[in-house]
Amino acid sequence: MTIKSSSRVDHAVAVAKQAHEGQLRKTGEPYIIHPLAVKKILEEWGMDEDTVIAGVLHDTVEDTSLTLDDIRKEFGDSVAFLVDGVTKLSTARNGMRDIDTYLPATKDNFLRLMIALGDDIRVLIIKLADRLHNVRTLSALPPDKQKKIAKETLEVFAPLADRLNMGQLRVELADLAFKYVDPKRFNELKTLITRSNKSAEESLHKIESEISAALKKEKIKFTISGRVKSVYSLHKKLAKHNQNINEIYDLTALRIIVDDITDCYLALGIIHSLYTPMNGRIKDYIAMPKQNGYQSLHTTVITKDKHVVEFQIRTREMHEYAERGLAASFYYNEQKLTENYKKGKIEHLPTNLLWITELQMTAAKLREGKKVDLKKLKLNLFADKIFVYTPKGDIIDLPAGALPLDFAYRLHSEIGDHVVGVKINGKMSNLNKKLEQGDIVEILTSKNQTPKTSWLDRIITSHARHKLLHRLNAPTSTATEQRKKPRTKKNKAK
Ligand code: MN
């Protein structure tokens, strides 16, 4: 990545140095160390010049005599806007005064933060860089402050980095913070990971050379490397599996990076021909990306000497995106600078990050004093998605917790309006049954059926609710429809 340096950036550094003159950090170092570290992080992420400059100046308006007008005069509207955003955000977090004027009361800090950020997502990226440097230097603070900041980092900033598919940042934030939140547990798990890596080391070398030989034989270009599991994600996984370490299959993992998607699947085939894949552990996040846009093939195999190893296979681009996420999008978008981009709007967001657009629209509505359904917003923004199938094999994505009627209305409102029953994985089921990842859902309909008010309790998506309410409020089914002979027939969902 090219590290940019320009006279504008140099000028910003000079201005910040002067403004923070005489101020010290808790570590005893000159304060300017902090904005300069934030600058460096933003440059490493490949952010644009305005964002880097705003990073340099991000603490000046709050902590020095420099005003927003000064910044606007020197560096233009865009930089001033970003600095204002970061300042407001930190004021907002120290008592949420500003946000309270337009944000309905909610205790959900995550949500509040997101709405505050809706205007320009680059504000969030500066905030993440700011937080990263603050947790990297957390040791200088008194213990109670350490715990507070670490906890907030785990609860708000690490999940945020995950939402933005900034994998590298998520791991660093979470592990740095977890060390302060639960030092004893952190050390335990760290030791466990090191020990497990050590015991697998010899075996891994053998696997690496076996696979390398096989891939070379097929003329696939690749790089292979070990992947270190994050302490915090192991902690969370163990909690899910009753602390049973034997159920954690990705302690040892190898990552293979290849040139294109075809090679990803070829490599997967080669691995499966060498070792025994574990049942139910093959995940195709290339065909079905995670909600944050993450793409990769995962498989877990048992080697000849009985080691369990997870493989992640992806292209270089997917890897880049998995590590840098939203920041990578900015980087690529900057290559084709547009007016919209300069205003902080990204034009070519990957579909999986379109929630950012939704967030920006919601923030605008709130500022205009319009009502916003926060529950719905939260569902749309944060609920994880599941993928279910029609009997013909079409993939439908729905928020986790979706019910058969959500599925039916998603296919077509005509299907939704006439639901009489549902088969899930070939078995008769009922309309209260939550759909699960991978279910095959067949909707049974009857021409005779009409939408019921009680159905409102059996849907969770705003899309289905909207369609259903529309039908309930409209004059009921037409006379011709009612005169038709009642006749139940299975209607394969298309
Ligand atoms: Mn700061």
Image (spheres, rainbow, N blue to C red):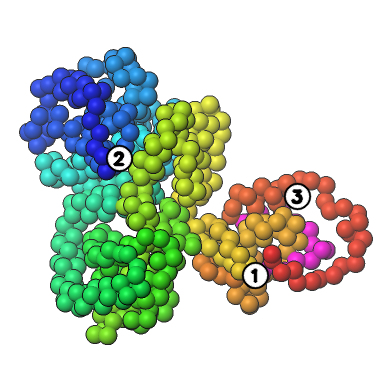
Which residue appears at 64% of the width and 56% of the height?
A: 410
Where residue 318 sits, quadrant-wise, is bottom left
Task: Please give the label number shown on residue 392.
Answer: 1
**How many numbered marks have been drawn onto this rendered protein structure?**
3
Q: Amino acid at mark 2?
A: Gly
Q: Earlier in the sequence, mark 1 or mark 3?
A: 1
Residue 214, magenta (yes or no) = no
**Residue 73 pos. (x, y %):** 32, 14
Q: Amino acid at mark 1?
A: Lys
Where residue 264 sits, quadrant-wise, is bottom left
**Mark 1 surroundings within 10 Å by alpha-carbon count, few (fewer than 14), some (14 through 19), many (20 or more):** few
Of marks 2 and 1, the one in the foreground: 2
**Residue at mark 3:** 471
**Position of 153 compared to 268: left or right?**
left
Q: Is mark 2 within 8 Å of ligand 1?
A: no
Q: Which residues are magenta?
A: 442-459
Of marks 1 and 3, the one in the foreground: 1
Front position in the image: 96 or 311: 311
Q: CA distance from mark 1 to mark 3?
A: 27 Å
Which residue appears at 74% of the width and 68% of the height?
A: 491
Where residue 460 sits, quadrant-wise, is bottom right
Task: Please give the label number shown on residue 267.
Answer: none
Task: Please give the label number shown on residue 46.
Answer: 2
The N terminus appears in which quarter of the rendering?
top left
Query: Circle 3 sits in a helix, a strand or a loop, which is it?
Result: helix
